[in-house]
Amino acid sequence: MTNPGTNPYLEAAKRASLWHAEYRRKMKSCRFDTIAVHGIYSMQEALDFNQGSIIEPIYMSTSQGYRDADEMEAALGYRIPTWCYSRIANPSIYYLEGVLSLLEGFGGDFETSCIATSSGMAAIQSAIDPFLVTFHGQSDKPMNFVASAQVYGGTYQQFMMRKQYDRNIEWRKVINTTDLQEWESRIDENTRFLYGELPSNPCLGFFDIKAVADLAHKYNIPLIIDSTVATPALLRPLLYGADIVVQSVTKSLFSSGFGICGAVIARKNITSNIDNPEMKADFAQYLKLLPNRDNGPNVSPMNAILALNDIRTLRSRMDLFSRSTTTVAKFLEKHPQVECVDYLGMESHSLHELASRYMFLVDSEFDELYGRKVNRYGHLMSFQIKGDAKKTREVFDALTMIWRATDLGRIKSVATIPAISTHSQQGEEGRKLAGIPDNLIRLCIGGEHPDDIIKDLDQALSVLDGLKIHVTFPEFSAGGASSARIKKEE
Ligand SMILES: *Cc1c(COP(=O)(O)O)cnc(C)c1O
């Protein structure tokens, strides 16, 4: 090839891009469930290029071959849509990114884009790192970022150890996130972004997204939200001014629990005080083409397709889980052995009103079951038992159907004691800041009937009445855990 202008692939690529953009626009006008089911995979694409396969194909190949030098040159110069190498892009991952960007931007009249990552932690790292750079001419004083103290345990470690300890980037913690003045008092000219979880895992912290987004923009910095607990079926922070959303796709989006995956979804033209026009124009695309290409935190095509397949039923699942969680929370609230229940859906919760302004089951007004906007608060709740750390373990150990696992968003209900699991590494002081007492059990309600979940909780709590339940696992048996015996004794 002599002159890039004569490359025959450029014209074809332009036509394909226009067609894809048109299809995306068409999908954007559909209801949430339709987008979740079909995403950006069209019938025409299936028939023309994918043997008519009605499900998005998995391209496990590491690399793409090219017809000739012209095509290769245009592809590797990012001048035609291509995937060249799966660390950078891949058709199966493309479908996942397409559907997530549409769902997270659902209801907004702005454009969004998405990059999938190997995990939620990789998504957080990918989302914040481009702001933690020193540019020529910028102040060389230590940088900082302002983020709520109540965050997921892994996020706490990443912020505390990998950023503050390893790199001397200060994490300025906001303790009372509903206090706008506290947020503002932490910001200075070296602040690179604001960050929060909505709702937070496991303490269900919540704040006024719109007010905090406005505050960020007043200081010319972005607001980044981890919206894993809500999912786009219940909350879409971009609609209220957030610049970037991170998702641990691993959780409710990828409900079957077959793999780890994350995603960064951003609106186009984000706010930032970093002088990097390319980054601000299309943040997710920038990550894809540059930092994540260089750092390599990409997801495998297999995980991408499996996640995509679960996302199709996201809305109805989140509705079911939320309703069951409300039922379970009401039961626990009345239980004599329960000190208190923490669930945003309870009217008694101090953040109930605030959360009710933001958390709705998407499209419920078009659902014949509801016919109006209905609040839904997700499937994460916690409760404190009347007792100490030891008693908490006893109740926990007595669960027979609810899994003891540090997980969230599964089709199966899971429970954890955050103080000894997700939040053990941050020590007592960190847990105090995050509001994690020893007698707290976090519950994440799945798809079982709530009657059976309640039965399991009730019998587990009965250990506090002095009635002991032992679940004994034989040391060795061919049946393994399936032959566990349950023995009750006084
Ligand atoms: C699990 C979780 C993460 C981390 O995601 P991984 O996929 O496990 O890396 C981040 N944020 C929240 C709120 C989470 O629950």
Image: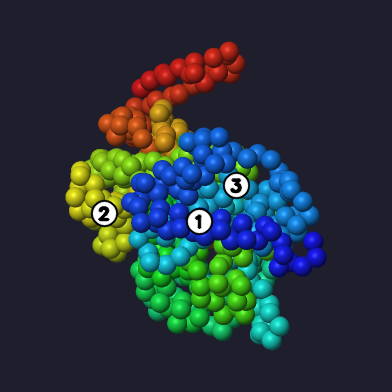
Disc 1 residue type (three-letter)? Trp
Above or below: residue 331 compared with residue 353: above
**Numbered badge on residue 10:** none
Give how far apart the Cα atoms at labels 1 and 2 are. Answer: 37 Å
Regarding residue 145, the answer to whether it shows in the image is no
Residue position for label 3 = 91
Where is residue 246 drawn, in percent x and y?
51, 58
Image colouring: rainbow
Q: Quadrant of the C terminus?
A: top left
Where is residue 189 drawn, in percent x and y?
56, 84
Tell me the residue at 72%/65% (across/down). Answer: 6
Above or below: residue 395 compared with residue 153: above
Residue position for label 1 = 19
Residue position for label 2 = 375
Q: Secondary structure at mark 1?
A: helix
Give how far apart the Cα atoms at labels 3 and 2 are. Answer: 36 Å
Kindly report which numbered mark, 3 or 1, lies closer to the viewer in this rendering.
1
Classify residue 324 by image quadrant. Answer: top left
Whether residues under marks 3 and 2 lie with C-beta atoms below 8 angstroms apart, the answer is: no
Whether residues under marks 1 and 2 lie with C-beta atoms below 8 angstroms apart, the answer is: no
* Of the image marks 1 and 2, the number of the one nearer the N terminus: 1
Q: Secondary structure at mark 3?
A: helix
Question: Considering depth in this image, is 236 or 333 the residue closer to the camera?
Answer: 236
